[in-house]
Amino acid sequence: MSEKKRETAIIIRKEEISYGIYDMWLRTEQIAELAKPGQFVSLYCADGSRLLPRPISICEIDKNDKAIRLVYRVAGKGTEEFSKMTTGMQLDIIGPLGNGFPTKKKKAFLIGGGIGIPPMLELAKQLDCEKQIVLGYRDDLFLYEEFKKYGSVYVATEDGSAGTEGNVLDAIRENGLDAEVIYACGPLPMLRALKEYAAKNQIECWVSLEERMACGIGACLGCVCKSKNKDAHTNVNNKRICKEGPVFLAEEVDF
Amino acid sequence: MSEKKRETAIIIRKEEISYGIYDMWLRTEQIAELAKPGQFVSLYCADGSRLLPRPISICEIDKNDKAIRLVYRVAGKGTEEFSKMTTGMQLDIIGPLGNGFPTKKKKAFLIGGGIGIPPMLELAKQLDCEKQIVLGYRDDLFLYEEFKKYGSVYVATEDGSAGTEGNVLDAIRENGLDAEVIYACGPLPMLRALKEYAAKNQIECWVSLEERMACGIGACLGCVCKSKNKDAHTNVNNKRICKEGPVFLAEEVDF
Amino acid sequence: MNMKVDLAGVTLDNPVMTASGTFGSGEEFSEFVDLNKLGAVVTKGVANIPWEGNPTPRVAEVYGGMLNAIGLQNPGIDLFIERDIPFLKKYDTKIIVNVCGKSTADYCEVVERLAEQPVDMLEINISCPNVKEGGIAFGQDPKSVEAITKEVKKYAKQPVIMKLSPNVTDITEMAKAAEAGGADVLSLINTLTGMKIDIHKRKFALANKTGGMSGPAIHPIAVRMVYQTAQAVRLPIIGMGGILTAEDAIEMMLAGATAVSVGTANFHNPKVTEEIVAGMQTYLEEQQIADIRELIGAVQ
Amino acid sequence: MNMKVDLAGVTLDNPVMTASGTFGSGEEFSEFVDLNKLGAVVTKGVANIPWEGNPTPRVAEVYGGMLNAIGLQNPGIDLFIERDIPFLKKYDTKIIVNVCGKSTADYCEVVERLAEQPVDMLEINISCPNVKEGGIAFGQDPKSVEAITKEVKKYAKQPVIMKLSPNVTDITEMAKAAEAGGADVLSLINTLTGMKIDIHKRKFALANKTGGMSGPAIHPIAVRMVYQTAQAVRLPIIGMGGILTAEDAIEMMLAGATAVSVGTANFHNPKVTEEIVAGMQTYLEEQQIADIRELIGAVQ
Ligand SMILES: Cc1cc2nc3c(=O)[nH]c(=O)nc-3n(C[C@H](O)[C@H](O)[C@H](O)COP(=O)(O)OP(=O)(O)OC[C@H]3O[C@@H](n4cnc5c(N)ncnc54)[C@H](O)[C@@H]3O)c2cc1C
Ligand SMILES: Cc1cc2nc3c(=O)[nH]c(=O)nc-3n(C[C@H](O)[C@H](O)[C@H](O)COP(=O)(O)OP(=O)(O)OC[C@H]3O[C@@H](n4cnc5c(N)ncnc54)[C@H](O)[C@@H]3O)c2cc1C
Ligand SMILES: Cc1cc2nc3c(=O)[nH]c(=O)nc-3n(C[C@H](O)[C@H](O)[C@H](O)COP(=O)(O)O)c2cc1C
Ligand SMILES: Cc1cc2nc3c(=O)[nH]c(=O)nc-3n(C[C@H](O)[C@H](O)[C@H](O)COP(=O)(O)O)c2cc1C
Ligand code: FES
Ligand code: FES
């Protein structure tokens, strides 16, 4: 069982890196130390009308500085509240949550789509293998430059303003790429397409899923997805995304 | 009908002047201009779990600076929220509310008890007559020095640590004072004693009452008190403290 | 872009109304809101004679809402007709008079008195939890809902809105009973019965012990009941309960409401009704919806 | 200072328990809370066989609370007995097993299986609004409340707590029915049925359309129902619904609860149950109350 903490973190850096997308570094007590790529934290709101914590993936980990980096899009009231906070302010968080990505030594695709791109950054840093990073953007290429340090980066944009016009699979095809393992996070249609692509090409495929959460620690059964096999904990064909996930072998879950 | 505004005010000064008692100046757009002594404003909380505005009496008015001064005690979550705000922050308020004190040219008692002391300050400034200011404290003499500018000040403290040991009536008796009109704000037992004292001595007596409020502008009928005569607006023996009050001729209302 | 909606033949300029008891007869709020911009003003409940209401404290704040036990204080129908209706007639908005009573005869007397008055609709409050006689007792039993609706309809010259209580096992039973009794429109929800205790004094926060709970805290319950009712009857519904924003109002319409009433939110922001009208307009523009009536019951 | 309370002969070290379904069987929260410090752990509802529960989304946030429609997913009584009871037995706290079923026979089967198990009490959930069969249907009619209570009591070796639904016109009718059926303790309230609609997608926020509303938003309704029930029956009451702080827990006791359960608040702060125990202790000290039982029903 991975260890989790509820802490009061301090915002040590914050900026808007793209339209409505914020980049925030938090100084933690122990969470940075415990965190792995692909795990997430949940952020509590200060406003009393919003009680449930907001799950946000860990984008980068700086164990020396005891800090974690979160990149999030303003999607509603909670993320709006966070986006208005400033350096030096405190924020209650819980984490690290979930399992995180496995790190295999195989030629890899790291695939991120939209707001699914940030969690691939720490993975890119920690993976020790040949890394082909494929990023799908709507238009603005946030975080793009940072990925270039860790592998060869391919881009797809919806409007064709950069890289391949289309989606990440279009970019893979256009560049004639292949790999032995896929790590992916992004919108459901992208993950579904990757699952199919991986099955057809018999590639191991790891996807990070999302679901509405309440507890974030596996107690409420709010965040399940259907699984191929009976889950050992739930004793039914449901896996808890916050606990057994958010990263699953694509073939083992329905989404 | 007195004019009222809903505004976003700015905190231009704030300090704790006694244990748990805060002194706050707000820059307003129009409220300072419209305000009279004995009126109040209501402050909205930023936290979404608290929807009703908090009524706070106007302690001082600075029309030149478009500012009003509020002195409040932390009594619960709302006042706690205000007490944590800092200079430069914005606060939504509504006001000026209520009728305020009449200003008669008669030898006067201005009597304040506890957190009922602050509203007497602007009244002391504006009254043009012989002013005997009688203040009842638990112990710490907040605002005391400021009152000295506007009249002769007599003090009663519960513990006898300053002035008369006892209540404001004890101080009046000990100092052999008399007056033709009473203006008073403070705890109910004090106001009741003053009503009786005024009746016995046939003195005109104005008291400022409190009640739980919702709208603060006379629409919800939440804040009524019983009145001797049928009220013209309500058509029953109820007066709205937020509208016909908070200041009443003591003999006309039950409390 | 059309914002107009129709309630039993009465056309409102937009679906936003005020909730009875939170807006007086509009005068106090007219300093903050242009009443001409509202679909309708619904007045505080009025009885055949003046009522003094309950002892204080009558209101208490709770998490995300409030409790009230005003006890239907009102100036009586005479003064109401003399003063409040003429005030409202100065504005270009619809006038809906909320009616309360201690007996069926009381209700009918008020309804009869209003027959020749220039009011657009009547809202019959059979769901007030804060008075001993009348009020909610009428609203928790389908037979009496049907009976009082029938009686009131005999005297009413204007369309009749029956206002339902949420303090029931099955709101659709009450809705069907009102429909059977001849109601023209339903309005829901009134307040949920709640209680607050001051733990330091170990006393009830309200003199009446219990009070009616309102505000955003009850919104999901209201949305559910509006949805269920819309599935169960054919009458138009005025949805209310915890509407604080244009989003909340739209949610209520998607659940099946033709119009909405805004109550407790007025205390949090006296300009809120006008802001909600504007917010709904913006939503229609953004979503490119030509007619607001497309929203009614459009949830999938 | 005494913090101990007694529920049908079972003595809890303090009145703070966890609300069923919000705390699993305690394992996940044991990283954050010392389970030894809690009066009791109430487990997630368990049925005779494993249940898959409802499709997702199963949870949605609402103003001051949340909706859930988990649909009583559970691993079934076999795995529960094999894994969850032994886990809880490691701690010095009372074990209360929440039981669900689709039919009276289902409930009885689970209760019978638990008869020889080291559990302290059984909480029978006849009030879940999120399953089609069983659940709330049992809890909205006094006759069926009484009948199922009687049946369950035949098989139960431990004291039986009947958990009541707030989605009723009169909670005291259900309470009296449970008392008549032989219940040892009552627990209330379960969730209120609510709904949320995503106005941008114009879709229900929950796959199940409706969900059970919980959290501070429902607290005043829970306090009212606990108070009414305490006036109507002689059974001890476990009060729950929106308890977020020690103050809320004390309020519930003043209304008439002997013990309290904390649910949704665990999601807002996983350490909250322990903090509530500490806060209640501080209150007793400040108010110089020697025995927490003095609070039970002490509102004036
Ligand atoms: C494991 C995981 C990792 C995530 N990582 C990121 C990330 O790195 N960056 C990022 O921008 N977003 C991420 N998300 C999505 C993020 O959680 C939501 O955008 C956020 O919760 C929205 O909160 P809000 O208050 O702004 O929106 P609101 O719509 O007001 O939120 C209302 C409720 O719905 C929940 N909710 C809304 N959208 C989502 C969603 N997509 N997934 C789960 N719950 C949701 C909220 O948490 C809250 O409880 C992640 C979600 C999950 C489950
Ligand atoms: C006309 C008027 C003038 C006032 N002037 C002052 C002043 O100058 N300085 C000052 O310190 N206090 C004043 N008060 C009291 C002040 O309004 C309360 O202390 C304050 O509302 C408490 O809010 P809270 O959120 O901290 O407490 P909580 O107890 O958390 O408040 C809960 C609810 O109860 C209401 N409430 C609580 N106490 C009172 C009270 N005594 N009177 C009315 N409503 C109350 C709150 O407004 C809120 O709606 C005045 C009250 C009134 C009616
Ligand atoms: C202070 C107050 C007074 C009310 N008075 C009445 C009334 O006289 N008649 C009535 O039908 N409803 C009355 N109500 C109920 C509201 O009209 C409305 O149904 C309820 O408050 C839910 O809406 P909200 O959450 O927007 O406030 C009153 C509500 C409040 C808060
Ligand atoms: C996610 C979730 C799951 C629940 N599951 C159950 C359950 O299995 N059995 C049950 O009796 N009540 C269940 N409940 C109801 C709670 O036990 C409790 O009665 C209700 O949530 C009110 O308390 P609260 O406001 O403190 O959460 C559940 C509540 C939630 C939020
Ligand atoms: S969010 Fe509670 S189990 Fe995953
Ligand atoms: S607070 Fe609404 S009438 Fe005074």
Image (cartoon, coloured by chain):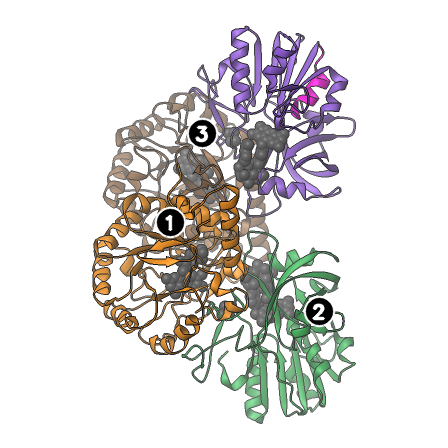
Chain colours: A green, B purple, C brown, D orange
* Badge 2 and badge 1 in a common chain: no
Q: Main secondary structure of the magenta part?
A: helix
- Residue C154 in percent (x, y) is at 26, 34
x 44%, y 72%: residue: D90
> In terms of depth relative to the viewer, which is nearer, B219 or C133?
C133
> In terms of depth relative to the viewer, which is nearer, D181 or C230?
D181
x 35%, y 54%: residue: D6
- Callout 3 amino acid: Thr
- Residue D265 in percent (x, y) is at 50, 57
x 74%, y 83%: residue: A153
Where disc 2 sits, the SS reads strand
The part of the chain drawn in magenta is B118-129
- Callout 1 amino acid: Ala
Magenta segment: does it hold B119? yes
How many angstroms separate mark 1 from mark 3 (CA)? Answer: 27 Å
- Residue D243 in percent (x, y) is at 47, 52
> In terms of depth relative to the viewer, which is nearer, B25 or C292?
B25
Q: Which mark is residue D257?
A: 1
Q: Residues within 10 Å of mark 2 (few under 14, many from 20)?
A: many
